[in-house]
Image (tube, grey):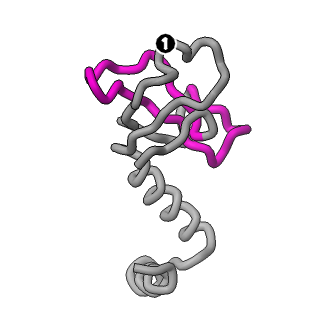
Amino acid sequence: MNLQDLDYILKKIFNIGTTIAYYNITIKFYIMRLVGKTVIIISDNDNYEEYKDMELKITHATNKGPFYDDAIYPEKLCDLKVNKTGEKVPFALYEYEFKVLN
């Protein structure tokens, strides 16, 4: 489905079809596509050293909430787990702090 199809559907069903609707829906689809991706940390933050060379999997991504820095919008804040062990990573990362492998 492309944006023109989506615009048509939104206008016909919900009587909306604005840039805001595109933006919100595009962000939601993008967040859904991030979950499950394998990443590695590229940030030089010393707090991440223990997990720096590990492959991690994104378990949750958001651009809202009490821990989200609105100044970073629209970057997503992502929860992670270690691919090999399933261990939950004890911190969340913004998109600019990791590189997606797949």
| Name of the residue lying farthest toward the front | 53
- The residue carrying mark 1 is 50
Q: Residue at point 46% right, 80% down?
A: 2
Q: Which percent across, then down, holds residue 19? A: 62, 73
Vertical position of residue 71 compared to residue 93: above or below: below
11 vs 80, nearest the viewer: 80
Residue 22: horizontal and vertical position, in percent?
A: 55, 70
The residue shown at (61%, 67%) is 20
- Taking the view exactly as shown, the residue that stands out farthest to the left is 85
Please identify the quadrant where the N terminus is shown.
bottom left
Q: Can residue 53 be found in the magenta stretch?
A: no
Between 34 and 74, the residue placed more toward the observer is 34
Left or right, 99 with respect to 38, comes to right
What crowding class fits label 1: few (fewer than 14 Cα within 10 Å), some (14-19), or many (20 or more)? few
- Tell whether 71 sits left or right of 33: right
Q: Choose top left, top right, bottom left or bottom right for residue 80.
A: top left
> Dot 1: what SS?
helix
Residue 51 sits above or below residue 5 on the image:
above
Total tally of numbered discs in the picture: 1
Q: Which residue is found at the position 40% from the left and 37% from the top?
A: 58
The percent position of residue 78, horizontal first and vertical second, equals 48, 35
Where residue 79 appears, as percent x and y from the top left, is: 43, 30
Asked if the magenta segment contains residue 73, the reply would be yes
- Residue at horizontal 73 percent and vertical 38 percent from the top: 71
The residue segment tinted magenta is: 67-95
Q: Is residue 87 left or right of residue 50?
A: left
Amino acid type indicated by mark 1? Glu
Identify the image quadrant of residue 21: bottom right
Eyeballing the image, is 99 above or below 51? below
